[in-house]
Image (cartoon, rainbow, N blue to C red):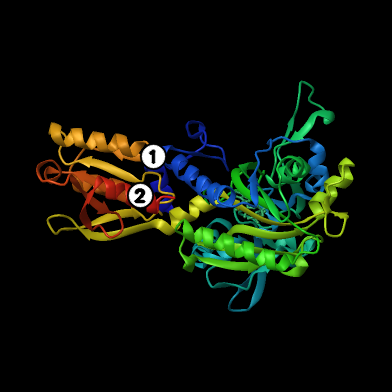
Amino acid sequence: MENIVALAKRRGFIFQSSEIYGGLNGFFDYGPLGSELKKNIRDCWWNDMVRRRDDIVGLESSIIMHPKVWEASGHVAGFTDPMVDCRESKQRYRADQLFFSPVFYKPAQKFLGYVAILEADEKTMMKDWFKRSEKLRHISGFLASGDEIGEALSFTEIKEEQLSQVLGPNATVPGTLTMPRGFNLMFQTNVGAMSDASSVAYLRPETAQGMFVDFKNVVDTGRVKLPFGIAQIGKSFRNEITPRNFIFRSREFEQMEMEYFIHEDADWSKCHQEWIEWCRQWLLSIGLPESHLSLYAHPKEKLAFYSKGTVDIMFAYPFGVQELWGIAARGNYDLGQHAQASGKPQEIFDEATKKKFVPHVIEPAVGVDRILLAVLCAGYAEEDVKDEKGNVEKRTVLRLSPRIAPVKVAVLPLLKNKDALVGRAKDLHKKLQRRYAVFYDDGGNIGKRYRRQDEIGTPWCVTIDFDTIEKPGDTFTLRERDSMTQKRITEADLFALLDEKVY
Ligand code: ATP
C-alpha cells in the first residue's frame, strides 16, 4: 500500500488536498494522470450503463437540495455512525470499528484489562497489531512482557462500567474512551444571507435522492417505460469519523449510482441477481481480476426495515477485503417517502391492470474513488526484467486496462535530433491525439522512456525508428507493456488495435 501511495504521488495521480497547508484529512486531489484515470472510469461506466442501453437514462441533479429531501429520506434522523471519543488522545473512532482484547497476566492467568484495537488491525493486520501491542507495553505500562491478549470483543459486547479498564488505541492510560453516541455524517451549510435554523441545508451524502426526487420529471418527459433506470455520477460528502486507507474512505468522494425501477409485482430477486452480475462483469471489463472479487450478502437482521436484500461486491485491497459496490433492493421505500412528505404522488399507471402503483427499485451504488484505488492496487507490480544488455533491473508497472489507462499510447521518436524521425513522430502524435489521450516523449534513452510509461500504465509505446523512414511500408515498433514484446505495425493497424481495445 505504501508503494502505491508513493507512486500515486510521484507520478501525479493523487495528492493530498491543500498539501502546502498541511493537508485536510479525508480530502484528496487528482493530478494530471489521476484525473484522466478517473474520467476514464466514469466514461466507461456512463457509456456502458447509459449510452449502450435502451432502458437507462442519465441525470445530473444538484448537490444541495431542499432540506426536506433529507428529512423524507431518513438521513436527518438516521444517517449516523456511532462515535467514540478518547479524552486523552482526542481521537475519534467509529464504535463499530473498535474491538476490545482482554489482557491476561500469563503466569497467574490474571485479568488485567482490555486493549482497544481497530477493526482493520484485528482482521487483516495481526502482525501490525502485535507490533503495536509491543509499543503499548512501553508507553503505558499497562501490558508487561509475558502478558497475553485474548480473543477480541466488539463494542456492543462491552458494558459501560468496563470502560475504565480499556486502553484506547492511542492512549497511554486506561479509561479514556467514552460510550458511543450517534454522529450525523451530513455536512451542513446555510443557503442565503441568513445563517440560522431556517437556512440550514446539507451537502448530499449520496446522489441517489436526486433520482427519486426527479422521478416524475423523468417519467413525464423522458418517454421511459418500466422497467427503466436513472443513472447519475457526482460528488457526495460524508463527514466520516475515521477517514482512512488513502482514498478508500474519504469525506468528499464521487459516486456512480443507478436506480432501476421495476413493477411492484416484478420478480425483484431475479432483477437484483442480474444487476449483481452486471456490476461484477463490468468490473472485470475494466481489468479487475476475478480472484480479487467476492460477494457479501448482508444478513437479514442487519437490513433496514424496508430493504429486501443487499449484496456487496467486495474487493481484496492490501488492507483487507472491503466493500466496493453495494447492490440494494430498496422496495418502494424512497418514492413512498417522498410522495408522503411532498404530497405529490410518485406513481405510474399500469395499462394492463388500469391501476396506479409506486414502482420498486434496485440500486447499484459504487464509488469512483474506490474503483480507482482497486485498479491501482490490482495493477501495481514490481518485477525483475532484463535490459538491452541483459542486466537484471527492477521495473514498476501498472497493469491498467486499455479502457481506463490515462495514456493509451506513447509516441517516441528514436532520436530527437533527426528531423525525419521527429517529423513522422509528430505527425502520428497529432493524428492519434484527435481520438485518444497520447503522450509524446523524446527525452532519454528508449529503455528509460518505456519504463516511465510502464509506471503510469500506458499499454503501448510506438517508436519511430530508422526502419520507419528508410524501409518501405511506413511501419513503427509497437512495444506492449505487459509482455514487453515488440513488433512492427502500420498506422492503420495501430488505429484498428486502439479501436478494438479502447471502448
Ligand atoms: P461503508 O459501509 O464502507 O461506509 P456504505 O455502505 O455506507 O459504505 P453506501 O452508502 O452504500 O456505502 O455508498 C455506496 C458506495 O459509495 C459504496 O459502495 C462505496 O463504493 C462508496 N462510498 C461510500 N462511502 C464512501 C467514502 N466515505 N469514501 C469513498 N467512497 C465511499
Residue tagged 2: 498
Q: Is mark 2 within 8 Å of ligand 1?
A: no
* Residue furthest bottom as drawn: 108
Residue 100: image location, x then y, percent: 66, 65
Does 30 appear above or below 155? above
Q: Is residue 114 visible?
A: no
Determine whether 73 is above or below 203 in the image. Answer: below
Mark 1 is on which residue type?
A: Arg
Q: Is residue 392 visible?
A: yes
Residue drawn at x 56%, y 50% as measured from the top left: 244
Decide: marks 2, 1 in contact (CB < 8 A)? yes
Residue identified by numbered label 1: 435
- Left or right for 470, reference 503: left
Question: Going by the picture, which residue comes out furthest to the top?
Answer: 193
Q: Give amino acid for label 2.
A: Leu
Q: Is residue 479 above or below residue 21?
A: below
Q: In the image, residue 345 lies at what x, y percent? A: 87, 45
Q: State which tag comes first along the sequence, 2 or 1.
A: 1
Quadrant of the image occupied by residue 98? bottom right
Q: Position of residue 307 (x, y in %)?
A: 77, 61
Q: Residue at x 52, y 53 (%)?
A: 371
Q: Position of residue 232 (x, y in %)?
A: 63, 44
Who is closer to the viewer here, 331 or 374?
331
User: Which residue shows up at 28% across the image and 60% down it?
Assistant: 483
Label 1: how many Cα within 10 Å (few below 14, some 14–19, many 20+): few
Give residue 93's mark. Answer: none
